[in-house]
Amino acid sequence: MKRWYRLVFTYPQAKILVEESLNYDEYWKEKRGNIDGTQARAISANEKMRADYVARIIGNTDSVVIGDIASGPGVIYNYLKGKIQLRGYIGYEYSEYALNVARSLGMTGVQFDINSERDLSEVQEADYFLMLEILEHIPHSEKVLASMYNKARKGVFFSFPNSGNFLYRLRVLFGRMPAQWIKFPNEHLRFWTYTDLQWWLKALGYKDYEIYAYRGAPVLEKIWPALFAGSFVVYLKK
């Protein structure tokens, strides 16, 4: 209830720093702490829910190659390697600090700018691609999704917050726009509700997909995901 109250009536931070862009090295250092510390390698509850869904869909019968776009400090890799058979796993990440943490866990890491046409073109083919909590941060989500879908042999997973969640609706009712940011209001550039998501996928020509609702009100998120899911993971099948 305290979390719900904060989401409806407060702002993530009182003082807004004026920055041209977010410093992702500093972002990950503040979020994860020292590169050698346990916090840098710890998987959060939300990350675990996303990773468990990915592991359940992929299964453990065949070894697979995964490309992880915006892989951060590699905690998804570190978790999945104990759940599924990995023949290869490449993390593509902008932050050198996050890559160093991921490499210390054994992940192959490539420094990568998602806004660079060249970097996108150089992403290697894989069985599956993960784009967890990244599409909402960029203006050209459609292009990046299409690029990874074309390079995937079996499918693509992507996730984002549900902008139609009842807490965000209450926030608007009380005169505040939904606040899906931590440091800066411009962290999220794109927003989807459950209905928007279904329209968007259809408009882009994706027909074979599954939507997993999580991080919301228990039980209710499965009955009425449009209103009570906190976030969605989408699995696009090839």
Image (cartoon, helix red, strand yellow):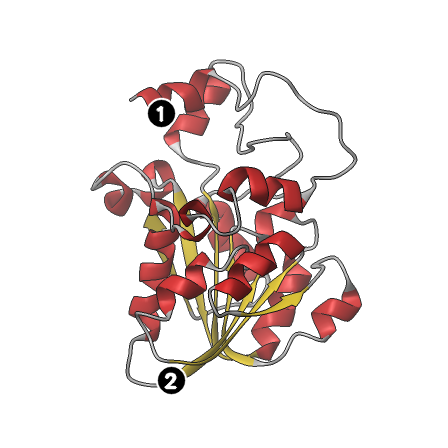
Q: x and y percent of residue 190 in the render?
A: 61, 44
Q: Earlier in the sequence, mark 1 or mark 2?
A: 1
Q: Residues within 10 Å of mark 1 (few under 14, many from 20)?
A: few
Q: Look at the numbered disc 2 and give the secondary structure of its residue.
A: loop
Q: x and y percent of residue 229 in the render?
A: 35, 41
Q: How many marks?
A: 2
Q: Residues within 10 Å of mark 2 (few under 14, many from 20)?
A: some
Q: Amino acid at mark 1?
A: Arg
User: Which residue lies most toward the left here?
Assistant: 219
**Quadrant of the rendered structure where residue 185 is?**
top right
Q: Quickly name the residue at label 2.
A: 63
State the residue at coordinates (48%, 17%): 10
In screen coordinates, is 37 left or right of 100?
Answer: left
Q: Amino acid at mark 2?
A: Ser
Nearest the eye: 200 or 162: 162
Residue 95 seen: no
The image shows residue 186, relative to residue 109, as above or below, that is above
Q: x and y percent of residue 108 in the render?
A: 56, 72
User: Which residue lies most toward the front here?
Assistant: 36
Distance (Cα) linking label 1 and label 2: 40 Å
Residue 118 seen: yes
In screen coordinates, is 88 left or right of 143?
Answer: left
Q: Which mark is residue 125?
A: none
In screen coordinates, is 119 left or right of 180?
Answer: right
**Quadrant of the rendered structure where residue 99 is?**
bottom right
The image shows residue 167, relative to residue 200, as above or below, that is above
State the residue at coordinates (32%, 37%): 228
State the residue at coordinates (32%, 20%): 2
Q: Quickly name the residue at label 1.
A: 3
